[in-house]
């Protein structure tokens, strides 16, 4: 679908694709459900930072 630069578009339990810190060079996406939204600002150019149910933390690149 679309990117996750707007905090208002991200909801708890939403299925998303995120880029983890260690995958930034490769651009590999990790998919999961949003457990917690970590970015406080309404927008972020690189994507809203979230914690997935697996405990992994990354920036939302795709909402599925």
Image (cartoon, rainbow, N blue to C red):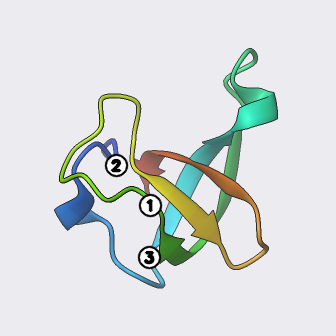
Height in image: 57 above or below 2? below
| Label 2 packing within 10 angstroms: few (<14), some (14-19), many (20+) | few
Q: Residue at x 28, y 42 (%)?
A: 5
| Label 1 packing within 10 angstroms: few (<14), some (14-19), many (20+) | few
**Which sits earlier in the primary sequence, circle 1 or circle 3?**
3
| Label 3 packing within 10 angstroms: few (<14), some (14-19), many (20+) | some
Q: Residue at x 47, y 63 (%)?
A: 38
**Residue 35 horizontal/vertical position (percent):** 57, 80
Height in image: 27 above or below 8? above
**Which sits earlier in the primary sequence, circle 2 or circle 3?**
2
Q: Are marks 1 and 3 in contact (CB under 8 Å)?
A: no
**Residue 30 horizontal/vertical position (percent):** 71, 50
Q: Nearer the viewer, mark 1 or mark 3?
A: 3
Q: CA distance from mark 1 to mark 3?
A: 8 Å
Q: According to the image, label 2 marks what residue?
A: 1
Q: CA distance from mark 2 to mark 3?
A: 13 Å
Q: Which numbered tag is attached to residue 41?
A: none
**Residue 31 horizontal/vertical position (percent):** 66, 58
Q: Are marks 1 and 2 in contact (CB under 8 Å)?
A: yes
Side (left or right) of 62 relative to 52: left
Q: Which numbered tag is attached to residue 64?
A: 1
Q: Residue at x 52, y 61 (%)?
A: 50
Q: Nearer the viewer, mark 2 or mark 3?
A: 3
Viewport quadrant of the C terminus: bottom left
**Residue 24 horizontal/vertical position (percent):** 69, 24
Identify the element where label 1 is drawn: loop
Identify the element where label 3 is drawn: loop
Q: Residue at x 51, y 61 (%)?
A: 16
State the residue lying farthest toward the front.
40
């Amino acid at each position: 679908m679309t990117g996750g630069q707007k905090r208002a578009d991200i909801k708890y339990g939403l299925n998303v694709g995120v880029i983890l810190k260690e995958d930034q060079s490769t651009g590999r996406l990790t998919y999961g459900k949003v457990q917690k939204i970590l970015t406080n600002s309404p927008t972020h150019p690189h994507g809203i930072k979230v914690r997935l149910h697996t405990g992994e933390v990354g920036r939302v690149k795709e909402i599925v």
